[in-house]
Amino acid sequence: MKLKHSFEKWLTRKGSVRDETDGGLRPPSLPAPSKAKQRKRTMTKEAQPIIWRTGKKVTLRPHREEDLSTYQRWINDPEINRYLMVTWPMHEGGQRAWLEKTCLSDPDDISVAIWTTEETPRLIGNTSLALDIRKQSATTGTLIGSTDDHSKGYATDAKMLLLDYAFNGRGMRKVTSPILSPNGASQAYATKCGYRHMATIEQEHWRDGRWIDEVRYVVFREEWLPLWEEYKKDL
Ligand SMILES: CC(C)(COP(=O)(O)OP(=O)(O)OC[C@H]1O[C@@H](n2cnc3c(N)ncnc32)[C@H](O)[C@@H]1OP(=O)(O)O)[C@@H](O)C(=O)NCCC(=O)NCCS
């Protein structure tokens, strides 16, 4: 007790600040814990959300039954599904079948929810990763459900976490992404995550009254690793 007291006195002399979430003193050289971390510390374990991976702006979480209708709303929204492969009406039964399939925990076909790390976290999208173990190759797909949440770096952060899992967690050699050519945002965020254009498949999809190209983007493990080394520094 006496030892603790004098240590605290020494820390105070060094300009340390009391960290309310810890109830202890934190040297000024250590950054204050993020709001999300502070909140987590004050919650009981049972009240904490189930989080699979944590990034800079988002967390990836397992799907929940109550999110089914949100996913259904997003996938039926023409602004969101315009450049997705699924453009037909998604009924509750179809959405449920997708959720049940993904929740069966096929280790080679995974999907997770994307939540913000704001003070009050919000469910903003979902992302998937399909692994071909024989080829050591995977494909990914992401959806951010509201245009209000676009261009804020959420998909980039989610994809970097998923690529970490694909390359470092599952030993994949390469990850590819099929993208409809007018989807500029998708190509832009893939590029930010280290992907590059690999091929163009001409006139592959019918959209808005015309045939449009599909572009295939690819990132190889050895190309991505240096990017990850930088990225993970401020995780
Ligand atoms: C594609 C999608 C997942 C991107 O998500 P996001 O969270 O907005 O992505 P990010 O913010 O991480 O990155 C998007 C980048 O694209 C840029 N961008 C946005 N619209 C663009 C366009 N039309 N052309 C070129 N770049 C564009 C943004 O400025 C941003 O780059 P910056 O950070 O350098 O400014 C999101 O737009 C979406 O869910 N769209 C609907 C579903 C979909 O098409 N999914 C992809 C299927 S392949």
Image (cartoon, rainbow, N blue to C red):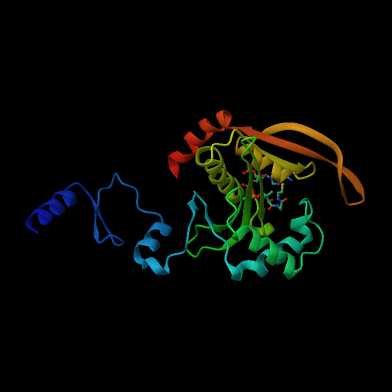
Q: Residue at x 56, y 46 (%)?
A: 162
Q: Residue at x 80, y 44 (%)?
A: 182
Instruction: Name the spot of residue 46 as percent of width and height, x first.
Output: 40, 69
Q: Is residue 35 above or below residue 218?
A: below
Q: Nearer the viewer, residue 11 or 39?
A: 39
Q: Is residue 78 left or right of residue 18?
A: right
Q: Residue at x 23, y 51 (%)?
A: 16
**In the picture, residue 222 is in which quadrant?**
top right
Q: Is residue 61 above or below residue 55?
A: below
Instruction: Name the spot of residue 177 as percent of width and height, x first.
Output: 69, 41
Instruction: Name the spot of residue 183 as percent of width and height, x first.
Output: 76, 45
Q: Is residue 4 left or right of residue 226?
A: left
Image quadrant containing the C terminus: top left
Q: Nearer the viewer, residue 36 or 108?
A: 108
Instruction: Name the spot of residue 58 as percent of width and height, x first.
Output: 53, 53
Q: Nearer the viewer, residue 136 or 160?
A: 136
Disc count in the image?
0
Q: Nearer the viewer, residue 132 or 210?
A: 132
**In the picture, residue 131 is in which quadrant?**
top right
Q: Is residue 180 left or right of residue 209?
A: left
Looking at this rendering, what residue extends furthest in the left direction? 2
Image quadrant containing the N terminus: bottom left
Looking at this rendering, what residue extends furthest in the top direction? 222
Looking at this rendering, what residue extends furthest in the right direction? 209
